[in-house]
Amino acid sequence: MSDSCIFCRIIRGEIPSYKIYEDERTLAFLDINPSAPGHTIIIPKAHVTRVEDLSEEDAQALFRTLHGLVGGIQDALEVPSSTIGINNGPESGQEIPHVHIHVIPRTRGDRGRIIQGLVQPLNRLSAEEMRRIAERIREHTSTLD
Ligand code: 5GP
Ligand code: ZN
């Protein structure tokens, strides 16, 4: 828990929210400045800033809540699709330092963009660069094995 964190204050009920769902580990509520009607935020109740710092239990609980809610959000807003995203760290645009998943209902013709379009590479990467990058990431993630 953080005294000043806006999302911790929502969890404690000090700031009102349009609540969607709550369980022992997670909370879902409407984004106050929605990108589309039904734009929902899903958070862990633990104050953790970044995805990589979540406990395995909270990581599982977050995805469980996402999985349980996303179809219903789409049905309620009568849309066929949604964009699901996490701004992970300030350089990615994260403004609230408490992990949160954005669920943004999407329709054909909403003039929204795709996640891969957020950043454009300066140059195409060569096969050799791709191979080296994959190898380096494998080395840094070997704890998963
Ligand atoms: P970020 O850029 O950190 O991924 O996004 C933070 C999101 O939290 C923004 O979309 C913003 O509209 C939302 N937000 C900020 N303050 C509040 C608030 O007090 N209540 C709710 N429900 N959402 C908030
Ligand atoms: Zn917090």
Image: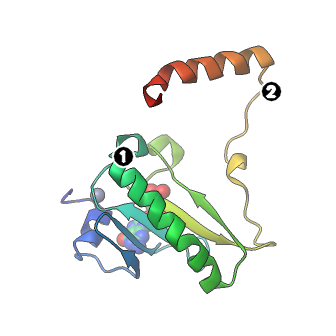
Residue 87: where, in percent of width, then height?
A: 50, 50
Instruction: Using a 10 Å C-alpha cutoff, classify the residue at mark 2 as few (fewer than 14 neighbours), some (14 to 19) or many (20 or more).
Output: few
| Quarter-of-image position of residue 18 | bottom left
Q: Is residue 81 left or right of residue 9?
A: right
Nearest the camera: 46 or 58? Answer: 58
Q: Residue 56 has which mark?
A: 1
Q: Residue at coordinates 27% horizontally, 70% vertically from top-left?
A: 11
**Ligand 1 is within 8 Å of the C-beta of the residue at disc 2:** no
Relative vertical location of residue 86 with respect to residue 140 in this rendering, above or below? below
Residue 22: where, in percent of width, then height?
A: 35, 74
First reached walking from the N terminus: tag 2 or tag 1: 1
**Residue 26 visible in the displayed image:** yes
Return the residue at label 2. 124
Q: Quadrant of ligand 1?
A: bottom left
| Quarter-of-image position of residue 133 | top right
**3D distance between C-alphas at marks 2 and 1:** 35 Å
Task: Name which residue type carries label 2.
Answer: Arg
Q: Residue at coordinates 40% horizontally, 51% vertically from top-left?
A: 59
